[in-house]
Image (tube, helix red, strand yellow):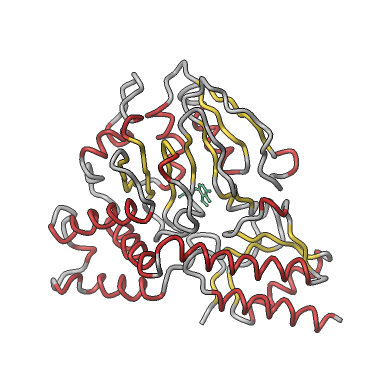
Amino acid sequence: MKHNFGAGPGILPQQVLQEAAQAVINFNNSGLSILEISHRSPDFEAVMDEARALVKELLNLGDNYSVMFLHGGASSQFAMLPYNLLGENETAAYLDSGTWANKAIKEAKFFGKVNVVASSKESNYTFIPKDYEIPKDARYFHVTSNNTIYGTQIHQFPESPVPLVSDMSSDIFSREFDANKFGLIYAGAQKNMGPAGVALVIVRNDLVGTVERAIPSMFNYKLHIENGSMYNTPPVFAVYVSMLTLRWVKAQGGIKAMEKINNEKAAKLYAEIDRNTLFKGTCAVEDRSRMNVCFVMNSPEQEKEFLNFAKERDCVGLKGHRSVGGFRASIYNALPLSSVEHLVKAMQDFEKIGS
Ligand code: PMP
């Protein structure tokens, strides 16, 4: 068995993979593959309905929210959000906490004005900026809840006088939070929710259809909501596997249970990073992510050796992003505690052979 610490597409629950594999051969005992049936068939409509309902249930979302499953990953949402919400002469506020936030900022500038209220770029994004004010006249305030590359996470969302918007690609469904405080949430599926190919978008209904510009159909939230995410052929398999993963989250005890185990995994791994004389964390302790754990070695020349050492022990996907170096252990929902324990043991063994 491999211990998959990859940052994304990331680990999925074994049970989900088994069910998905079965559905590729024979979906719902129909004698047909999920890959060869109409997205308008009752069997698939039931999948889409259940996926949407599970998102609402797991996040305790009120009736004033719509849930969409859209093509184009989280990156398309960088543009689709301002396309639909930000008028040409309006300003949106953004927090620059990493590469993905930066890309979101770049896209928003195509549609309106952008006010970057704070940035940690100067320190290579090793912390989450906290000293800022959200302008009251901004159309919305955009944050990245978890910075996948740098391993930082917002542990306390700001009180915002304007609709709060978050890219939650790498920590959605991993911890409890009040989703009803947000105007819009989006997330690429391929970390905590399913395979690549679909993005989840949750929007408060009063924010939809408020800009004056004409929006082409495929980029128009209103149209996707009205058509139940079936304006065109949806990414059926990605939606199906996401639905299975959401069912799995619910069966584990929902987000509360996920958070408990995720906290335990993160605490174990950070404790070892802090204890082990060979390793050190890369970001501010109070902002450490409980999804992407970034660390380096005090002697960088040993990093390749440890990567191989870990690989020989079936720990894969640990290489850090090139902008941080070292290691990144992504410990998403589907990664069991035993995998973290296995990695911790590898770090301890490596320390022993060196001394
Ligand atoms: N936002 C965050 C926080 C991410 O981690 C990623 C992907 N790693 C993206 C956005 C981009 O997602 P996608 O590849 O689905 O466009």
User: Which residue is depicted at the point 71% across and 68% down?
Assistant: 271
193 and 129: which is toward the camera:
129
The quadrant where residue 222 appears: top left
| Quadrant where the image shows the C terminus | bottom right
Q: Which residue is the extreme one toward the right?
A: 355
The quadrant where residue 201 appears: top left
233 and 149: which is toward the camera:
149
Q: Seen in the image, is 301 located left or right of residue 1?
A: right
User: Which residue is depicted at the point 59% across and 49% down?
Assistant: 155
Residue 243 position (above or below residue 302): above
- At which x and y percent is residue 295? 71, 61
Q: Seen in the image, is 33 located left or right of residue 154?
A: left
4 and 268: which is toward the camera:
268
User: Which residue is depicted at the point 52% across and 65% down?
Assistant: 260
Residue 124 position (above or below residue 281): above
The quadrant where residue 28 appears: bottom left
Q: Seen in the image, is 199 located left or right of residue 137?
A: left
Q: How many marks?
A: 0
- At which x and y percent is residue 276? 78, 72
User: Which residue is depicted at the point 74% across and 82% down?
Assistant: 349
- At which x and y percent is residue 2? 53, 78
- At which x and y percent is residue 330? 57, 63
Q: Seen in the image, is 241 located left or right of residue 337?
A: left
